[in-house]
Amino acid sequence: MIIRQAQPEDAEAIAALWNPVIRDTAITFNSTQKTVEGLSAEISSRHAFLLAEEGGLMGFASYGQFRGGVGYARTGEHTIILSPGTRGRGIGRLLMQALEDHAREAGFHSMIAGVSGENPGGIAFHERMGYAQVAVLPQVGWKFGRWMDLILLQKLL
């Protein structure tokens, strides 16, 4: 398996992995599917957009600044999505380690994860990676006709 920086030409494969997660799960509250054009731009604008590949795309991780403004310039927020058939094989851990290494080298001090309260596996994964729950935002996400909580987890890099 290799982990590498995504390129704009990877956008189609990323969309094919990400859009079913958007469409079919509460892992993300977003309901607007990703376009190839939009992902190409996002790949170029994020601090890092990493792919795990082994005969095809197995997952990706990216991060950007947590909130706008110079005061948040050293705090990141990340996204990590894995192909369903690859979960439990250590790919998420490898992607997260590579992402955190990149963030540290770029001068980031803190990383935030916003995880749906309906994604206990995602919460447990982050806790195993050293993230601590710092906030629960009740009923801030709306999807599938119901309100959902957002769990914020943080790790000092």
Image: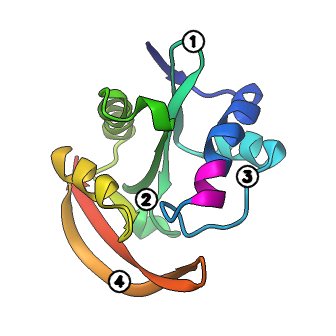
SS assignment at label 1: loop
Q: Residue at x 76, y 26 (%)?
A: 9
Q: Amino acid at mark 2?
A: Ala
Mark found first going from the N terminus, 1 or 2:
1
Tell me if label 4 and label 1 are in contact, CB under 8 Å.
no
Residue 48: x percent and y percent?
51, 37
Residue 146 shown left or right of residue 11 in the figure: left
Q: Amino acid at mark 3?
A: Lys
Residue bearing the label numbered 2? 73
Q: Please give the range of residues in magenta.
A: 20-24
Q: Amino acid at mark 4?
A: Leu
Residue bearing the label numbered 1? 55
Assess disc 2: are there few (<14), some (14-19) or many (≥20) residues with their C-alpha within 10 Å of its C-alpha.
some
SS assignment at label 3: loop
Marks 1 and 2: which is nearer the front?
Answer: 1
Residue bearing the label numbered 3? 34
Res 55 → quadrant? top right
Seen from the viewer's position, the closer of residues 137 and 102 is: 137
Marks 3 and 2: which is nearer the front?
Answer: 3
SS assignment at label 4: strand
Residue 143: x percent and y percent?
58, 77
Residue 150: x percent and y percent?
39, 75
Residue bearing the label numbered 4? 137
Mark found first going from the N terminus, 4 or 1:
1
Is residue 21 one of those drawn in magenta? yes
Marks 3 and 1: which is nearer the front?
Answer: 1
Query: From mark 4 to mark 2, how far is it between C-alphas?
Result: 23 Å
Residue 39 shown left or right of residue 91 in the figure: right
